[in-house]
Amino acid sequence: MSLQPVSGDAAGFKAALGSFAAGVNVITLRDDEGRPLGMTATAFSSVSADPLLVLVCMNRSTRSYEQVAATGRFGVNILAAAAREVSDHCSRPGSDKYLAPEWLAEHSEWHAPALAGALAYLDCETERDVTAGTHAVLIARVRAIGLDTAAPLEKEPLLHFRGGYRQLQRTAPQPRPLATSVKEYA
Ligand SMILES: Cc1cc2nc3c(=O)[nH]c(=O)nc-3n(C[C@H](O)[C@H](O)[C@H](O)COP(=O)(O)O)c2cc1C
């Protein structure tokens, strides 16, 4: 068996959590002058479909969180593999996170900026902002949805795993599930 105990501190925690392969998102928002900016985040989850709720976890020390906390509005952009450059741009702490006009795919109905390199976009409004350690857990209502419907299975998602980007690899068709009773073998 290769699973071994590691230190039960932040380093061990980060190493273990990095093993959870996650889709990469960019949380988008507008600054006080209405300019679009983004922050890369993998801590995102679906919560409820009735009402439509999602959650994201944002470090409370980020400038992006400050802005989201002040306005209660943000977008979640679920990135395609080709949008890696945008993810890099939006993940450097302290750097300029402004989004170039050629990256945007705006629509008059949407409040938060949307990215052309997204497979899906959720325009969100914060319902609850829960402080949890260094982070804020934002539970948000989905106000509008954008979806890249052009070729649903052709574009791969951008994934992150153990400190690096990954892409999906297509697997062979699933083998027939094992029979659960003797009768099914007949
Ligand atoms: C792959 C990846 C995933 C990340 N996920 C999160 C996340 O879920 N929540 C978070 O607060 N920061 C996350 N970060 C770090 C932020 O992107 C980074 O701290 C942020 O861009 C700093 O923003 P600021 O300039 O607004 O302070 C992630 C970074 C990377 C590279």
Image (tube, helix red, strand yellow):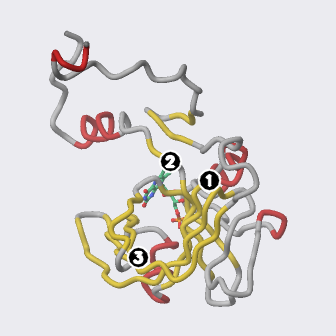
Image quadrant assignment for residue 13: top left
Distance between mark 3 and mark 1 Cα atoms: 20 Å
- Residue drawn at point x = 62 percent, y = 81 percent: 30
Mark 1: secondary structure: strand
Q: Earlier in the sequence, mark 2 or mark 3?
A: 2
In this view, the residue in front, 30 or 119, is: 119
CB contact under 8 Å: marks 2 and 3: no
* Residue position for label 3: 52
Distance between mark 2 and mark 1 Cα atoms: 8 Å
Indicate the amino acid at tag 3: Leu
CB contact under 8 Å: marks 2 and 1: yes
Indicate the amino acid at tag 2: Gly
Q: How many marks?
A: 3
- Which dot marks residue 79? 1
Give x and y (percent) for residue 177: 33, 22
Q: Earlier in the sequence, mark 2 or mark 1?
A: 2
Mark 2: secondary structure: strand
Quadrant, the N terminus: top left
Give x and y (percent) for residue 21: 43, 38
- Which dot marks residue 173? none
In this view, the residue in front, 76 or 29, is: 76
Foreground: disc 2 or disc 3: 3
* Residue position for label 2: 23
Distance between mark 2 and mark 3 Cα atoms: 20 Å
